[in-house]
Structures are given as structure tokens and as C-alpha cells.
Image: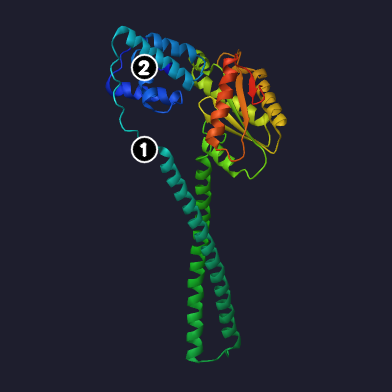
Amino acid sequence: MYLGKIGDGEELAGHVLIHAVLAFLEDQRLDPTPLNYSFAYHVVSEPAGALALEVARRTDGGIRLTTNEVEQLGNAIDGAADVAGTRPAAAPVPPAAPPAPEPDMAAAEALVTETLRQVAGFADMVSEMRTETRDFGRNLAASADALQRYAPIDSTDAAVAELARITAAMRARVEIAEARLEQATQEASELREQLAAAHDDARRDPLTELPNRRAFEEAVAAVASGPVHIAMCDVDHFKAINDLHGHPVGDRVLRAIGTTLARECPGHLVARYGGEEFVVLIAGADMVEAETLIERARIAIGQRRYRLRESDTFINGISLSAGMVTMMPGETLLSAIERVDALLYDAKRRGRNCFVGERGG
């Protein structure tokens, strides 16, 4: 929850306030509209005020505000200002948003893909050259042997001797070229493997070693046909785990949960979506099978015992809230994520540690 990052009574000013407003909007997944920006400004500029306290109450445990809640609370701000006969000071105009990283990432990925293609082409070309050079070397060796075999032992023919010398010299140079081509082939192969590994790393979460959000999005786009189900899972009260035990323990909990999810959902893509959120892409199963799979995984995570190696004690009460939707024909991934996010937070509002599907959960 973003408000936990601001101490009560702290005064924020200038660029610090602007960054705090933008961080609040990002944390709550609110578009930077004038209404949302003004709302966020009032929240972060008065962290001990009534609005900030109400927002803190509603977002406790990682629950994000809905658009309706923002409008409702924003109208309350305007009403209070009208009663007092004044209007709140205008929020500072935010600076131009920094360039979105997606185009840069897309350009980088295109460069990596093109480099992989060129390296593969170079490796194939070098391999062909090496084969041709080796064959040419063998032909030269055969020619040299033939000259020695068929030339008279006592021959003083200068032309034959010169031809034999040239053939031997060419053979030596070909052997050198062949050795260099073999080294080039090996280096090209190693570079190809390194680029492929880097390409894979860009789609893997370094903490859990699961596929990351980008890999998940690509996997959804690659599904050819059939029902596609998307489940969103969020660790309940994860901030409390970090606050009580520290971030290193929180990281180990996330790794353990990721491992359990992947084990309980064999054959399906489990990815870390961000923070304490995981997504599961289920294809080739009907809705009942998919819901059963996610519910079984959620229960398994709640039943797992998480031991603190520092004190040999257990962390109790770790659980997941989850929601799941089936993508409709022609539906965009963004739309499906918005729908599953709403179901996930419905599960949070029901008391957490539960699953909500489109049939009501």
C-alpha cells in the first residue's frame, strides 16, 4: 500500500510531492487523469488528513481503490470545500510523463532478434566455408600425392617440381584457414548461445525464476485456439510479512509460493506479474477444470509450512486470494486483466484467502 511509505504529518513539497502523487497513481493503477491526479494530490499532501486515513482504511492489505471509490471520495472533497466557502488550492501541474519504456523494450527486443538472426546466418556461412575449405584441402592433398606418385623418381622436370611446391604451399595455407574457420564457428556458436540466454533472461523474473509479465503477455498472444483462462493470485497481507520479518524473508516467501504454484499447475504457464501478484495462463481446459486447478493450488499454498531458517520458527497465516476469467473471442488482454483484477479484489473484500471465478467463486 503506497500510504505506508509516507509518515504521518510529513510535509511534501516540490518535485518530492509530484513524484509521490505519480507513485500513488501507479500503485493504485489509476490513469493520470485530472480527477485522479487531484485526488492523489489531496491524499499524499495531507497524509494525516481525513481523506488519507479513509484511503488507508480502504486499501489496507493491498486492496486498490476502484474508479467509483475515487469519484465518491473526490466528490466528498469538493463538497467539504464548498461548505467551507473555499476551494482547495490547485494541485501542481505534473511534469511531462517520462517516455514509456515499452517502445524502448520493443526496439531492444527487435535488435536482439535481428542480431540472433544475423549470428545464425553468419554461423551457417562459416560452417559452409569450413566444409568447402576442408574439401578443397583434401583435393589438394590428393593432387600432391598424385604428383609424387606419377612423377619419375629421377625426374628433373622443373615444371612438375614447381607445381608440387605450389600445391604443398596451398595445402598448408588451407589447413591454417580451416583451423581459423573452426575457431570462428565455435565463437559464433558461443555468441549465439549467449544471445539466446540473454533473450530468455529478459523474460524471466530474477527473484522467483518464473516467467515474467512480458513472457506471460507473449504466451497469451501465442495461444492459437481454444478456451483461454487467466487467473490472478495475490499474497494476502504481504506488506505485514515484510514489515514483521524483513524483505529477505518476504523474498523467500515469494519464491516458495511461485514454486508451489508452478508445481500445482503442471503444463500451464505460471508467471510473476509484479510485486506479490502471480498469473496463471490455462489453455486447453474447460472452465470447471481451470477453476478446480486454481482452487487446488490456492489451498496447497495455504497448507504449506513456511519456516524461518534464522529462528527455526514458522510463519503462520500465509494465504492467497485469487480470481479467474475466461477470455472472450476477440477480447484484448488488457480487458481480460481488468476483469480478473476486479474478481481478485472481490476475493479480498470477501475476507481474503478465497477464490472468485466468473460464476461467483
Q: Which residue is mark 2?
A: 44
Camera-nearest residue between 326 and 4: 326
Q: Hey, what amino acid is under mark 1?
A: Pro
Q: Are marks 2 and 1 in contact (CB under 8 Å)?
A: no
Measuring from the top left, give residue 14's x and y in whole percent.
Answer: 27, 22
Q: How many marks?
A: 2
Question: Residue 323, located in which quarter of the rendered image?
Answer: top right
Please give the name of the residue rendered at 40% of the width and 15% of the height, measured from the top-left corner. Answer: 75
Q: Compute the Cα span from label 2 to label 1.
A: 24 Å
Camera-nearest residue between 219 and 42: 42
Q: Is residue 114 left or right of residue 317?
A: left
Q: Which residue is mark 1?
A: 99
Measuring from the top left, give residue 38's x and y in whole percent.
Answer: 35, 21
Question: Residue 34, located in which quarter of the rendered image?
Answer: top left
Answer with mark 2 or mark 1, whichever residue precedes in sequence: 2
Camera-nearest residue between 293 and 69: 69
